Amino acid sequence: MEFTYHGLVRYAYGFANPNHAAALITILLPFLWVLRVYAKRLPVKIIVFTLEYILYLALIFTYSRTGFFVVIMSAAIFWAGKYFFIDKTKWNDVKLKSFLSKRVLGIVAVLFVIGVLAISFKAVDRYSSWIANPEKSITNRFLIWKGATQIIAENPQGVGAERSGFLFSNLYCPPENDITCRTMINSFLTFAAEQGIWLSLLLLSFLYTAVFLGLVYFMNAKETETRRIFILSMLTAIFAGGLSGIMSTCFDLNIANELLNLPQSIELNIYMQSVLLIIWCILPFLLIITVTVSNRANFKNLGKSGALALLLSTVIIVIMYSTGKYFEQASSCKITQRAGTTFITIKRNNSFSSLLFIPDKNTLTFKESLRWLKQNYPDYNYEIPLTELSKKSFVYSCDTVVLCGESSFWSNKISTSKIHLLLPNSILNKLPSNIKTISLPAFDNDGHNATWIELVKSTKYSNSKYKCKIKLY
């Protein structure tokens, strides 16, 4: 899929999404800032600055507003940390002469060139429109994030991999907004919705433990300057990755899983996505090792940081869960398991009977099926399978079953008291007595309607007590 902006290609550099490429760039930049500042030899400085300049240009051509915002925030954190905490520069010591040094003038010149390129290729227009005239790609995020909290509140155990976007698009998206998404456009909300709040609590606790521990030793004036600046660069990189993950799904476990399955041919974007995920996951480990390996006494601070991280993570999870409860819909949607099959249970009213609907995506989309159910069976709660069915799946099934499209073959294999066929694709040799209605297409393109009508008539002729109605879809 190619991303464009006003006819200009948004480069993704091997990723599936330019925002994910921008996330990797923002994670790498803090380490180049450290190398540029502390490199002693001029050739090394030139090489580092050239690499940094290339990354700035690459970031511009992603046209990523997230990347642009993240790199500004990361630069502010890194340079403020360096000048005011490591160099201990005071505002009173900052004079006009310091802004006229060769280093500052060189940086201004480079930023000027980058700015001219950004304006020439309309990147500035895209960045400014984020605030001045936000598009649906911005405003839709808030609706999706709201839906994510609802999914989490109703399914704290998680809905399973690659289901969050499907559930939001079909069940949680407001009727007036036609939004289709694969994820929650937020790495952490996607993880919480799909993997559950307990794994999310572990993930956040680990992440915040590394951050708090890094902050303790960065603020420690007794630490060496080199050690502190290295810790600062890792903290900044973790911040850049975290902020990128909040504003996009740049850390995608589902894509990384494809790499672990080791198929014969793997697309480049899967490798790149996995590299991004691995790099960002290594940073907290590296930060913890950096501050603890040299002194065993540091494990005491590790315990304190872990306790504080667990507390903060718990607060975040509770806020997220409570937000979902606050925006809770009239009908709840929960993921359940039965006889090896995963079902989604849509409970509209506790007093309603349950109906099992077996869909066929080649006949009707999920949204079309749900719309038809609400029109024809308004006083029911619905159970819909999300994975492959087996005969055991019907053992505890509801009294009423609706079979759509190709799934109509189940009518000869189950003993449910009431079966309804919706747009059946194939003609049955014999019509079971428990089939109560058959909904046929209004436009009989394949000529099946006449055959179905004749089958119903012949069945009624042979069994006077048999009752089956023909309806038009």
Image (tube, helix red, strand yellow):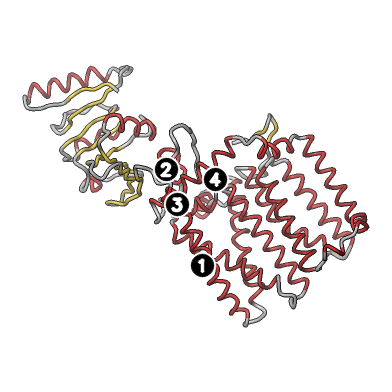
Which mark sits nearer the N-terminus, 3 or 2?
2
Spatial distance from mark 4 to mark 1, Cα to Cα?
Answer: 26 Å
Which corner quadrant of the image does residue 454 belong to?
Answer: top left
The amino acid sitting under disc 2 is Leu
352 horizontally vs 57: left or right: left
Q: Nearer the viewer, residue 203 or 339?
A: 203
Q: Position of residue 222 (x, y in %)?
A: 74, 78
Q: CA distance from mark 1 to mark 3?
A: 23 Å
Q: Using the rendered view, name the quadrant where residue 369 is placed.
A: top left
Badge 3 is on which residue?
194
Residue 197: image x %, image y %?
44, 58
Residue denoted by label 1: 311
**Kind of residue sitting beneath label 1:** Leu
Camera-nearest label, 1 or 3? 1
The residues bearing labels 1 and 2 have C-alpha atoms spaced at a distance of 30 Å
Amino acid type at circle 3 is Glu
Residue found at x 48% / y 45%: 146
Structural crowding at the residue carrying mark 3, measured as other residues with C-alpha within 10 Å and reported as few (<14), some (14–19) or many (≥20): many
In the structure shown, which secondary structural element does the residue marked by tag 2 occupy?
helix
Query: Is disc 3 placed on a helix, strand or loop?
Result: helix
Query: Who is closer to the viewer here, 328 or 182?
Result: 328
Label located before the other in sequence (1 or 2): 2
Residue at image coords 68%, 47%: 67
Count of all numbered marks drawn on residues in the image:
4
Return the mark for residue 167: 2
Q: Which residue is mark 4?
A: 185
Quarter the N terminus occupies = top right
Left or right placement of residue 153 versus residue 285 in this view: left
- Whether the residues at callouts 3 and 4 have beta carbons within 8 Å, the answer is no
Q: CA distance from mark 3 to mark 4?
A: 13 Å
Quick check: 57 left or right of 399? right
